[in-house]
Image (tube, rainbow, N blue to C red):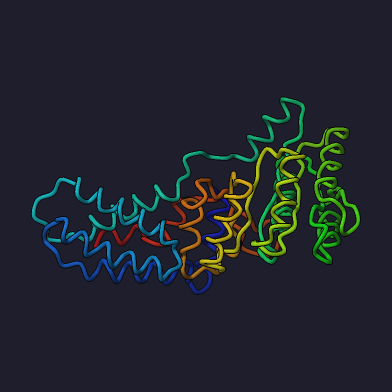
Amino acid sequence: MIALLNLLCDFRGREFYLFDQLRKNVSKLVKKISITEISPKSISKITRELKDILIKSEVAVVTADAICESLSVILLKTEHARLSNPKPLVLSALREVLLDILSPKKEIDILKRVEEAKMKRTPLIIAFFGVNGVGKTLSIAKLGKLLQKNGYSSVFAAGDTFRAGSIQQLQQHGEKLGIRVIAQTYGSDAAAVAFDAVNHAISKNIDVVLIDTAGRIETSSNLMAELKKICKVIEPDLKIFVGDALTGNALVSQVTLFNEKIGIDASILNKIDADVKGGAAVSVTHISSSPIIFLGKGQNYDDIVPFSPDFIVNNIIPAKQLNL
């Protein structure tokens, strides 16, 4: 929570543009509301405009539909007399819907999972997936640092044996953090690298195995076959998707594909501090039916914070707007 508050303070220390587009457009929509009664007709008008705003802010169409449908249900069920100012009612209902969309049906606490694995005398195995360029390898390093700060050991597995420089990149992070990297040569079987890392963790009583994987092209059938093999051989305890908030609709496609092909237990969303649209953050949890667990905001190892639905929603609908 302290880290999350520091992140918010960082944003306030410069131009405040997190989810700027979505926040401004939602605010404009609400200010235009002039109805004095909530009815199916008036709600339909609001949700039609809201859907357009959400899609233009790169919220997935299926997520935009879900938000509008839930908003309609809440407003129609709300008991109210003739309204002199319906704006707070609509905003409050929309906040409720967004919080529900962003709150996963299951929660994942990494540190709790590590502790549970320790009690069973087995390492927690986490595999990371995502296309190239989204910060997957750096996210692994950040999580390794987070584990260190909490007294847990880890080992990195250089499972991206395809991209030139990927093994060295992970090794550089390992050297800086003092974390062992298990690697083979380029072109090696990625599943074999992960298998070696797991055996190393077992023999050395290491708490967590963090497995990097290739992400050359999200539509590559060879890539997906390789990732499926890793999952079959290693049976990771957690499969974490890493995405870039700035890729918008491409991120939605990536989440959908990886979830369909290998299954996603949780996500890490990077570059959240530069996301002016906000659609990615709103869509990922809904599309994957799994939680976002961390947000990445920079290149330093400490630039990772726990995900909070309240933090996201407060940047779309600030609490002060409820007093309109």
Residue at screen point 20% across, 67% down: 33
| Vertical arrangement, residue 167 with respect to residue 128, above or below | below
| Residue 289 x %, y % | 50, 46
The quarter of the picture where the C terminus appears is bottom left
Furthest residue toward left: 82
Residue situated in front as seen by the camera: 233 or 242:
233
User: Is 125 displayed left or right of 3 in the figure?
Assistant: right
User: Is 6 displayed left or right of 20 in the figure?
Assistant: right
| Residue 162 x %, y % | 81, 61
Furthest residue toward top: 120
| Residue 111 x %, y % | 65, 38
Residue at screen point 40% across, 67% down: 55
Residue at screen point 76% across, 30% down: 122
| Residue 30 x %, y % | 26, 66
User: Is 103 displayed left or right of 250 in the figure?
Assistant: left
Residue at screen point 14% across, 64% down: 35
| Vertical arrangement, residue 32 with respect to residue 84, above or below | below
Q: Is residue 219 visible?
A: yes
Q: Tally the marks.
A: 0
Furthest residue toward right: 185
Q: Is residue 151 visible?
A: no
Furthest residue toward front: 221
User: Is 103 displayed left or right of 306 in the figure?
Assistant: left
